[in-house]
Amino acid sequence: MKLLLLYVHDYWLKPFERSLPEAPEAPAGVETGPAVVALIHVEAEDPERQDKLVTKAIKNIKWLAGKFETRTVVLHSFAHLAATRAEPERADALLGAMRERLAGADYAVHTTPFGWFNEFRLHVAGPSLAKVFVEL
């Protein structure tokens, strides 16, 4: 799994077009103020290590959120950070587990529509710490 974590002042996303024919209808989109945006790439071998990866990913997200005193997180499937990819349904399940764990820890969690190409805008904060790459 690869994570590109960004602390943003604001984030806006609108579904553009389906990338997977079986993807459900897209919701309205996502718009939020200060948040940690996690661009998440699930690699081919990751589903076999799902529990361990979810725990490590959540730890990293919560760490960055704590640094900027936010309880808002956006989980964005982003299959552009590595050469291999997990099967779509397995990647979606891993992101779902992350969403549940964060919500259970009282974070406001937004997820971007899985199986869609999206148009998005983000305003990343200036400090170096606002941009973190993690390889799990």
Image (spheres, helix red, strand yellow):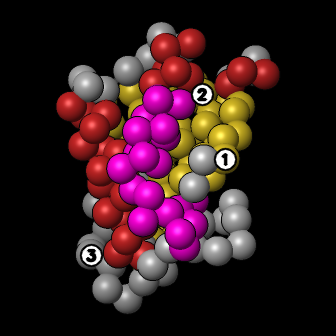
Q: Does the magenta stretch include residue 56?
A: yes
Which quadrant of the view contains residue 85?
bottom right
Horizontal relation, residue 110 to residue 86: left or right: left
Query: Where is residue 61 shown, x and y percent of the image?
Result: 49, 31
Query: Which amino acid does the dot numbered 3 rest on?
Result: Pro
Foreground pick, 90 / 31: 90
C-alpha gap between disc 2 and disc 3: 29 Å
Instruction: Please count the marks in the image.
Output: 3
Residue 14 appears in which quarter of the rendering? bottom left
Which residue type does callout 1 highlight? Glu
Which sits earlier in the primary sequence, circle 2 or circle 1? 2
Residue 51 visible somewhere in the drawing: yes
Q: Mark 2 points at which residue?
A: 7
Compared with 124, 43 (above or below) is: below
What's the residue type where badge 2 is placed? Tyr
- How far, Cα to Cα, is label 2 from label 1? 18 Å
The residue indicated by pointer 3 is: 24
- Callouts 2 and 1 close, C-beta under 8 Å: no
For label 1, the residue is: 135
Query: Quick one: label 3, few (<14), some, or many (20+) residues within 10 Å?
Result: few
Specify whether residue 121 is in view: no
Residue 59 position within the rendered picture, expressed as x and y whole percent measured from the top left: 47, 29
Instruction: Give the residue drawn at x 61%, y 37%.
Output: 5
The percent coordinates of residue 17 (x first, y second) are: 47, 76
Foreground residue, 44 or 13? 44
Task: Describe the element under mark 1 as helix, strand or loop.
Answer: strand
Q: Describe residue 57's horizontal placement relative to residue 51 as left or right.
A: right
